[in-house]
Amino acid sequence: MTKNWWQEVVVYQIYPRSFKDSNGDGIGDIQGIIEKLDYLQKLGIGAIWLSPVYQSPNDDNGYDISDYQAIMQEFGEMADMEIFISEANKRDIRIVMDLVVNHTSDEHNWFIEAKKGRDNPYRDYYVWSDPGVDGGVPNNLTSTFSGPAWELDEASGQYYFHLFSKKQPDLNWENPQVRQAVYDMMNFWIAKGIGGFRMDVIDLIGKVPLEGITGNGPKLHQYLQEMNQKTFGAYDLLTVGETWGATPELAKLYSDPKRNELSMVFQFEHVSLDQQPGKDKWDLYPLDVGELKKVLTKWQVKLGNDGWNSLFWNNHDLPRIISRWGNDQEYREESGKLLAILLHMMRGTPYIYQGEEIGMINTPINDIAEAEDIESINMYHERLEAGFDSKDILASINAKGRDNARRPMAWDNSDQGGFTTGTPWLELNENYETINVAAALADPNSLFYTYQQLIQLRKEYPLMVWGEFELLDTAEQVFSFYRTYQDQRWLIITNFSNEEQVFSCEDKIEELIIQNYRCPINQLSNIKLRPWQALVFKVKNEVARLSSNEEKKL
Ligand code: NOJ
C-alpha cells in the first residue's frame, strides 16, 4: 500500500473571516493568518484547509464566488496569498484551498453573461428550464437554504437552478466548457504551490435536476476522474470531497487509489445522528452513544484498504462539539480532551477546526436579529410561517446553527479577544476572557497540549495512522477499541458520559500513551472510569505473541 503525506498529517481548518484581523476592519484576513502561522506550527499541523478567500459578494460568506482567480478585498490581495503559501510551506504546512464549483455567485461574470439571453455563449454554463406544466417552477426540488431550488429569470421567462441561495446558481457540469474552465482555474492554483483542494458539495456536480437527481448523479465519478486527470492527478496533492450522501461503498468509489479520483471524503453519517430520523438537522434528537459507536465503527471497518476517511467533529457548518456531544459546563476540558483523543485515535486523517484546540463552545442567541447566517435566517422565517413557535426555532439555531462555529477566534483576554482592534463582524462568545489561546498556552494541562501531544504521537507512531481498528464490547456509554499495527497493540478507553462507568478487560498494560485525568492506573480489570475519562495504553500484544509461538512450533 502506498503511504501518502496526507494520511500522516493532521489538517487544521481556517475560516478566514473569523480567524485573525490584521487591519482593524473587524474581518479576519490573510495577513492575520500569516501572523498566526507560528502558533499553528507549534500545534504541529501539516496542512491548512482554507475556507474560501476568493472574490465574493458574501451572500454565503465566500461560498458564492464571483471570481475564482481574485482574492476577496476584505481578506487582502493575491500578493498576500502568495506570501501566505510560501510562509506556510517554509513551516512544512501545505495549503488546501476550498474548491466551490457546484455553483458560482450570481455576480460571477459567467452568470452575468448567461442572463443576457438564451443565445449568449455562457447560457449553458448554468442549468435553465422553461416553466413547469402549471406555468410555475419546473419541479418541486428545494434549496438547502429554504424555498424552491428554481428562480425565475424574468427577462427570458426561464428558471435557473440553485441548490443553495438564489445568489448561488448551479453550474452545468454537462457542459464540457464549464469543466475545462474549472480545470484551468484549478491549474492556476496548483501552479501557485498549493497542497490540494477541499471540494465543496462535490457529490452534487453530477445532478440531473429535471429528473429530480441532485446527489450522486450518473456522471459524477466520470467527472471526477476527468478532473483528476486534467489537474491534480500528476501532483502529490490532498483532495477531499464533501460528500453528505456517502456510504462506505460510495466512499470507496471516491477514494480507492486505483480509481484515480480523490484522496479521501468527508462523510457525515455520525454528525447526522442527533436529528429526528427522516427529518432535517433542525429537528433535534438526543444522541444515542450506542449509535455513534456503531456508525463510527462501520466507517472504520468497512473502508479497509480500498479507501480513506477523514475524521472530524467540527467545521464551519457544524456546532461546537463540546457543546453538542460533550459537556460545556462542568466537564468542558475533560470532555474536550476525550473527544480529541477518541477522534485522533481512529483510522483516517484528522481535521481540527479553528478554536477546537482551545475548547471553544457554542454561543446561544436570544433573538433572530443576532444571527448572521443565511441558512438560519431563512429557516427561521420559513418555519415561523409554517406555524412553528419562535422559541423552538431559536432552540434549533442555538443547537445547530452555523454561527456557533463562526464566532471570531479568541486569542487573549484583551478587548475583542485580540481578534480585532475594530468592531468584529460577528460578536465573540462572551467567555473570551477565559477561553482564549493565551490562556490555553499558559496552562500546561490545557486542551491545546492534548492536541499537540496527539499530533506528536501521530508523528512518532505509525500505528496511529495505519493500525487496524477493532471495537471492544463494553457498557453502552463506554467507547473502547484496539488499534493494532505490526507487533504493537494500543487499547483506547473512553467514557462518553457524565457518570462513572466500569470497564474491565484482561489485557496487560505495557505503557500509558495519553490520558485526560491525572490518576495512575496499573491494571485493567474492573476499573472505575470517571466522567469523560479517556485513556490510551500500549498493551501486551497477545495476538502477536500467540501467532509467533505458533510460528515457532512450525
Ligand atoms: C458546503 C459549505 O461547507 C457551506 O458552508 C456552504 O454554505 C455550502 N456548501 C454551499 O457552498
Image: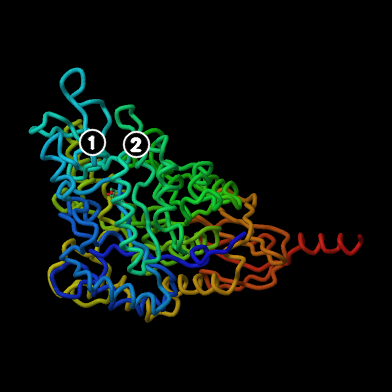
**Callout 1: few (<14), some (14-19), or many (20+) C-alpha neighbours within 10 Å?**
many
**What colour scheme does the image use?**
rainbow
83 or 137, nearer to the observer: 83
Pinpoint residue 533: horizontal percent, then vertical percent.
Answer: 53, 63
Q: Which mark is residue 213?
A: none
**Left or right side of 132 for 184:** right
Residue in view at x 50 percent, y 74 percent: 453
**Left or right side of 43 for 81:** left
Pinpoint residue 411: horizontal percent, then vertical percent.
Answer: 28, 74
SS at mark 1 in the image: strand
362 or 128, nearer to the observer: 128
Residue in view at x 15 percent, y 65 percent: 73
Q: Amino acid at mark 2?
A: Lys
Figure quadrant of the C terminus: bottom right
Number of marks in the image? 2
SS at mark 2 in the image: loop
Q: Residue tagged by mark 1?
A: 161
Farthest-out residue, top:
134
Q: Are marks 2 and 1 in contact (CB under 8 Å)?
A: yes
Pinpoint residue 294: horizontal percent, then vertical percent.
Answer: 55, 45
Farthest-out residue, left:
155
Quadrant hosting residue 207: top left
Quadrant hosting residue 171: top left
Figure quadrant of the N terminus: bottom right
Q: Residue tagged by mark 2?
A: 207
